[in-house]
Image (spheres, rainbow, N blue to C red):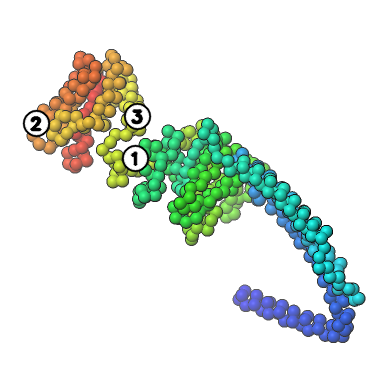
Amino acid sequence: MTSLIILFCVFLIIVVLVQIGKVYEMTSSIKGEAATLKDNSKWNGRLFLAFMVIFLGGVFWSAYHFKNVMMGYGPLVAASEHGHILDGLFNTTLIITGIVFVLTHIALFWYANKYRWKEGREVKFIPHDNKLEMWWTGIPAFTMTILVVFGLNAWNKVMADVKPDEDYMEIEAFAQQFNWTIRFPGTDGKIGTRDYKLTTGSNQLGMDFTDPKSWDDVIPGQEIYLPVGKKIRVRIIAKDVLHNFDLPHFRVKMDAVPGLPTFFVFTPSKTTAEFRQELRKYPEYNEPFDKTEPNGPKRWEKFDFELACAELCGKGHYSMRRIFKIVSQEEFDAWYATQESFYLSQIRGKEDDPNKDKVLDIEISQRAEEFSTSFKSAVESTVATERTLTFNHIGFETGSATLSANSKYELDNMVTALNAYPSVNVTISGHTDNTGDAAANQALSASRAASVVKYLTDRGISAGRLNARGYGDTKPLAPNDTEENKAKNRRTEFSIN
């Protein structure tokens, strides 16, 4: 019904306009052609002036009305150290071109009125005027020179790369349809190498896991944390089509081009919390974030810095939104400490791992730290069960008491711990599952415990501090009903005496 009423109203408007046109034609024929032309010219001139006032008034009103939602004005000042340079450049350009814009439109509509048709007025034809050409060429050329000089100065400052001796953090932004993958360096502060030929389903970035720098690299989840006041160098890469790395509040924008790595350097100058407090001062940001929940969070409370793709990269373009949280160095360090190495958590020991049979340097240092902490806790504990620990990273050849080559790293940690606690004595105990003869299992577990003791004594630990025992399959940790449980029962332990 509503649609029919609207169509009927539109039809009536068309009928009225047609009738007005007919009345105008009748009036013109009565007044005569000359009088009609004169009246039309006069009214057109006045309407030009009226339109000029309304148009320029609307331009200034809209600029003032929307200033708090435009970048560079109101609360949306740049949140990076270089941002004020770009904002200043935009303002300079706006002032110069704005003056030209206003004067040009005033002249356009004023002259349209002033030189409207009048009876008896002659039109002058000026084919060429050197003085006028000089003005029209010289002034724009001078203005453009000023803008280009300011632009080059801003470019050289904003696009400068980091210096070798600068304190900065480099991250990698990898774009693909339709996702940003952000990679952080590990504790070594260096991002590992990559090769597109290494790309697999589990290694979307093509990371080279034979490069030690890749072993501790971190790939966080949806929210990305960065420390305020820290210079950030973003290495930007695209996998498939043209994307664009855009952090508008930091005035960061750079194309991600397939096959052509780019970069951008910026320093965040405001935390997310500080920026929210700035927004809080403005009425429009105190409105409900969700209008269906008037008592819910305000707009300023839900604000976050966003990473977007500023290229139309496909139908899923909208889904490339990521959240960047700018926090203090202490908050960043706490967040970073919770992040796991992508290689160690997702690739290590699996089919795509090129280092399956190796113990990596990063694992050696991690295991040493974990062992030292566990040993210290066991020594200080008064609970008997807490004073017995399992060697997690030693092994033996199948059916033998011969230690595997990689067992030395765990046992060397034991040597270090015993030297750090010279008054501590330990008992080494061997255990097996229930496969095979019980007596053979007892003998094998005793031999394995003795092999561990021999390794330790060969490295200077007094034999009087060590005791070896074999328990065979008599002390299982789990029922011997699955291969997984049997593996738990095949273990070597040590107890603090």
How far apart marks 1 and 2 lie (CA) works out to 42 Å
At horizontal 20% and vertical 16% (from top left) the residue drawn is 463
Please state, as top left, top right, bottom left or bottom right, where the C terminus lies in the image.
Answer: top left
The kind of residue on which mark 1 rests is Thr
| Side of 122 where 14 appears, left or right | left
Q: Nearer the viewer, residue 100 or 138?
A: 138
Residue 57 in view here: no
How far apart marks 1 and 3 lie (CA) works out to 18 Å
Q: Position of residue 353 (x, y in %)?
A: 31, 43
At horizontal 78% and vertical 58% (from top left) the residue drawn is 136
Q: Position of residue 67 (x, y in %)?
A: 69, 50
Classify mark 1: residues with Cα within 10 Å, few (<14), some (14-19) or many (20+).
few
Q: Of label 1 and label 2, which has the lower sequence position?
A: 1
The answer to whether marks 1 and 3 mark residues whose Cβ atoms lie closer than 8 Å is no
| Side of 232 where 470 appears, left or right | left
Q: Helix or strand or loop: what does disc 2 sit on?
A: helix
Q: Quadrant of residue 384?
A: top left
Per the image, the residue denoted by label 3 is 365
Per the image, the residue denoted by label 2 is 440
Q: Position of residue 477 (x, y in %)?
A: 21, 33
Please state, as top left, top right, bottom left or bottom right, where the N terminus lies in the image.
Answer: bottom right
Q: Disc number at residue 484?
A: none
Per the image, the residue denoted by label 1 is 210
Above or below: residue 454 compared with residue 111:
above
Q: Quadrant of residue 60?
A: bottom right
Closer to viewer: mark 1 or mark 2: 1
Q: Helix or strand or loop: what does disc 1 sit on?
A: loop
Residue 147 in view here: yes
| Side of 471 where 376 appears, left or right | right
